[in-house]
Image: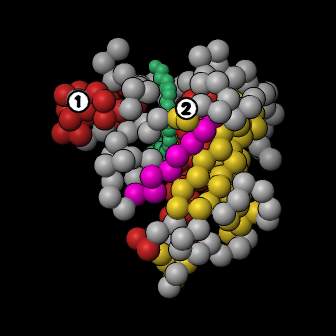
Amino acid sequence: MAPVETTLPERHPDAPEPATELPEHYAYCFGCGSSVEHGLHLRATAGEDLTVRSRFTVTTAHQGAPGLAHGGLLACAFDEALGTAVGHLLRQPAVTGKLETDFLRPVPVGTVLFIDARIDGVAGRKVYVSADGRVNSPVGDIAVRARALFVTVELKHFIDNGRPEDLKKVAADPSLLGRTVDLNP
Ligand SMILES: CCCCC/C=C\C/C=C\C/C=C\C/C=C\CCCC(=O)SCCNC(=O)CCNC(=O)[C@H](O)C(C)(C)COP(=O)(O)OP(=O)(O)OC[C@H]1O[C@@H](n2cnc3c(N)ncnc32)[C@H](O)[C@@H]1OP(=O)(O)O
């Protein structure tokens, strides 16, 4: 539960329709990027109202203990799934300020983790979100649960703080941003 009073935001009028498959937001994003060999390759679909459903397959590159997903890596998947919900449903750039996870059941290699994320409320620039993750099915017992606070930022945040050579690569090939963000508006 949010520690402050929040209001439920409107889904942005230009947010993708429910059931739309969402594009990766950056080709080199560890969470969703197709150019990261051992990344999560998380894929997401817009849901109804303020929800997004994501999924990714746990591979041998994602282990913490033999045959089991690393907890930090699962937290990364939730960061990505929650950020995707904020970015696409509110259409505002935002960064993670706080991320809290409950690991309720082990997640084996080979699992498809289904992550249902929702926006719970906003207070100024603060966006409170939460998500449930289930093993091999979008229904059933929850294996991992997360809550996070995202803080909306201007695009300037990324331009001022990103490593110049990576920003240059994106300026030279804007398709790396998956047509979701324009760094040179
Ligand atoms: C042109 C339109 C474009 C539209 C975009 C459209 C589509 C985009 C599509 C898709 C995007 C898709 C996917 C994204 C997927 C994944 C996302 C991964 C996200 C990450 O992986 S991102 C990396 C990790 N992340 C960081 O790298 C952040 C580092 N950090 C900072 O850069 C600053 O720290 C910042 C900016 C957070 C705040 O700094 P700041 O100076 O701007 O603002 P300030 O400090 O005033 O905070 C404002 C209010 O947030 C409260 N607040 C802040 N932090 C808090 C905390 N931890 N706990 C409790 N409250 C907190 C304050 O208490 C205040 O609250 P109040 O307003 O009540 O005073």
Judging by the rendered image, the residue that carries numbered circle 2 is 87
Quarter occupied by residue 7? top right
**Residue type (three-letter) at the residue carrying disc 1:** Asp
**Residue type (three-letter) at the residue carrying disc 2:** Gly
Give the residue drawn at x 59%, y 75%.
108
Is 40 drawn above or below residue 121 in the view shown?
below
Judging by the rendered image, the residue that carries numbered circle 1 is 173
Q: Is residue 5 magenta?
A: no
Magenta range: 39-46
**Helix, strand or loop at mark 2:** helix
Residue 2 in sight here: yes
- Residue 61, horizontal then vertical, whole percent: 40, 71
Q: Nearer the viewer, residue 35 or 185?
A: 35
Which image quadrant: the C terminus?
A: top left
Mark 1 or mark 2, which is nearer to you? Answer: 1
- Residue 181, horizontal then vertical, whole percent: 41, 26
